[in-house]
Amino acid sequence: MKMKSELFKRVAFAVVGIPVAMFLIVYGALPFLFAVIIISSISLLEFYKLAKLKKTSPNVYLGVTFNVIITLYIYFALKNTEALMCSGLIIIGFILLFMLSSFIVELWLKKENHLLNVSTTISGILYACFPFYSLILIRELHKIKEFFTNNNINLPLFFNNTQKFENFSIYFVITIFLTIWICDSAAYFLGKKFGKNKLYEAVSPKKTWEGAIAGFVFALISSVLLFHFLIPYFPFIHSIAVGIIIGIFGQIGDLIESLIKRDAGVKDSSNLIPGHGGALDRLDSALFVFPFIYIYIILIMAL
């Protein structure tokens, strides 16, 4: 009965959440940007809330402000070739300024644990926000392709086989999200039914090796099939690689969030979504997937 209740909650959330997410991904533009800002900021606030349970005092306002600034910069820099060329240095500059600002604020605040306060303020951005910057870059991959083309960088043939490369960006993001969801669902339900050997009981007692293997296998299968139907010109070997990244790093992300919650002594990162916890609970599997897939796709384009 409990398993049926969990299934109902997951399906109900999927029925509402997936269409909304698909609309934002397909439409893109400012609605997508604002959605990323909102979700990443909520994830950051949840991380800071968990950190406070460990007797630290992250600078919430500073963290959220920098997240909004960096997100806006990344999105609008993609529209400008000059800004894109020096974006790496500017992002590093933002990070250094953020770190410096965190220490300066601690100079004026009469609090304890200054080192921990600064560390959690910065790590919140790295853990809860940087993955969403990668998501923006993947969704706007057509603009990066244009930058490569304008700078006479030869791209693999399949990147030049499409008249509207933006469709590739859209279908690519959709494939990632659906594969993550299928991987999570397979790991949960098949692990629940067939799991006997604990994966990492000290961190997540309910996770099993059987569930992890099922998630990995279904990530591979779903990635290959989704790419075949949505982006048929995407090479088979790369669809396998994307499935491997999701099957491994998606489940590692899940374990890491479980570690953080267990350390903080809570079951969910928040009660934002009834029956599902918070934004971090729903997106934990994606937090390491987005950056590694972005790195992989850029390596394909550049090498």
Image (spheres, rainbow, N blue to C red):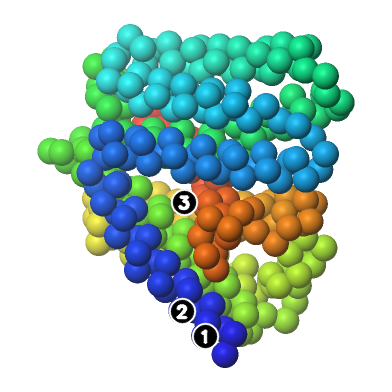
Q: Which mark is residue 119?
A: none
Image quadrant for the N terminus?
Answer: bottom right
Earlier-in-chain disc, 1 versus 3: 1
Q: Dots 2 and 1: beta carbons under 8 Å?
A: yes
Earlier-in-chain disc, 3 versus 2: 2
Q: CA distance from mark 1 to mark 3?
A: 33 Å
- Residue on which the image places disc 1: 4
Question: Residue at 35% across / 19% down in the picture?
Answer: 77
| Apparent side of residue 289 relative to residue 135 in the rendered image (left or right) | right
10 Å crowding of disc 3: few (<14), some (14-19), many (20+): some
**Mark in front: 3 vs 2:** 2
Q: Which mark is residue 241?
A: 3
Q: In this orientation, which residue lies closer to the viewer: 110 or 171?
A: 110
Q: CA distance from mark 3 to mark 2?
A: 32 Å
Q: In this orientation, which residue lies closer to the viewer: 278 or 298?
A: 278
Image quadrant for the C terminus?
Answer: top left
SS label for mark 1:
helix
Q: CA distance from mark 2 to mark 1?
A: 6 Å
Q: Dots 3 and 2: beta carbons under 8 Å?
A: no
- The amino acid beneath tag 1 is Lys
Quadrant of residue 160 within the rendered picture: top left
SS label for mark 3:
helix
Question: Looking at the image, is 245 positioned above or below residue 60?
Answer: below
- Residue on which the image places disc 2: 8
SS label for mark 2:
helix
- The amino acid beneath tag 2 is Phe
